[in-house]
Image (spheres, rainbow, N blue to C red):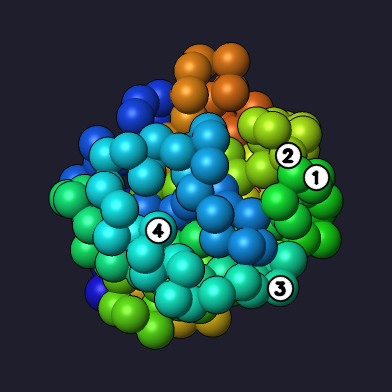
Amino acid sequence: MSETRVVIITGDLVEQAVDAIVNAANNDLQLGGGVAGAIRRAGGPAIQDECDAHGPVQVGEAAITGAGNLSARYVIHAASMSLGGRTTRVSLESSMRHVFRLARQQDVETIAVPAVGTGIAGFAIDECGRVMAECLKDALSQGWQAREVRFVLFDEEAKRPFETAFWHVFRAPGAPAA
């Protein structure tokens, strides 16, 4: 398979035409506000119904459901925090490793990912970009053959730290090859 295309854009996550979108989730899998609320509104009640049936997961894990009315086939819920809690580097890293593992298991070739944990969960955007880049690089080195991984950010202010982080992890002189 050819090299994975990594794209960093601004846009609306729920409008992405991909195999799967990632939800910035709490471990109770309750689709409240922020990214999760947008997914619930656009995807309809079927997603929350599947989350309820799946039940809570541990902080740092992920769960996969159908995507309801979205154009994606799946929503992968990255549980980087407890309900009302904060995201940490450890919980984000663990949940994103679970996300990419589930994507590989479900033969997801295209995926759209938000800046998980940077909203109400309070994680720093620059550190989020670095964790995302490191987790993606590890997933690809372990054999996941994604065609495109699209990081969908809210605005240009969020996009710049992601671009910097990805450059350092994937392209910087002395960095291991992707």
Mark 3–mark 2 distance (CA, rounded to whole Å)? 16 Å
Which residue bears the numbered disc 3? 58
Q: Are marks 1 and 4 in contact (CB under 8 Å)?
A: no
Of marks 4 and 3, which one's residue comes earlier in the chain?
4
Q: Are marks 2 and 1 in contact (CB under 8 Å)?
A: yes
Residue shown at the point (64%, 55%) measured from the top left: 26
Nearer the camera: disc 1 or disc 4: 4
Residue shown at the point (26%, 74%) measured from the top left: 1
| Secondary structure beneath label 2 | loop
Which residue bears the numbered disc 4? 48
**Residue 46 point in image, percent of width and height:** 28, 60
| Secondary structure beneath label 3 | loop
| Quadrant of residue 16 within the rendered picture | top left
Against 138, residue 31 (above or below) is: above
Which residue bears the numbered disc 2? 121
Amino acid residing under circle 3: Gln
**Residue 74 point in image, percent of width and height:** 30, 64
**Residue 119 point in image, percent of width and height:** 65, 32
Circle 3 packing at 10 Å, graded few (<14), some (14-19), many (20+), is some
Nearer the camera: disc 4 or disc 3: 4
Nearer the camera: disc 4 or disc 2: 4
Is there any visible trace of residue 3 in the rendered image? no
Mark 1–mark 3 distance (CA, rounded to whole Å)? 14 Å
Of marks 1 and 3, which one's residue comes earlier in the chain?
3
| Quadrant of residue 27 within the rendered picture | bottom right
Is there any visible trace of residue 58 in the rendered image? yes
Of marks 3 and 2, which one's residue comes earlier in the chain?
3
**Residue 60 point in image, percent of width and height:** 71, 67
Amino acid residing under circle 4: Gln
Of marks 1 and 4, which one's residue comes earlier in the chain?
4
Which residue bears the numbered disc 1? 86
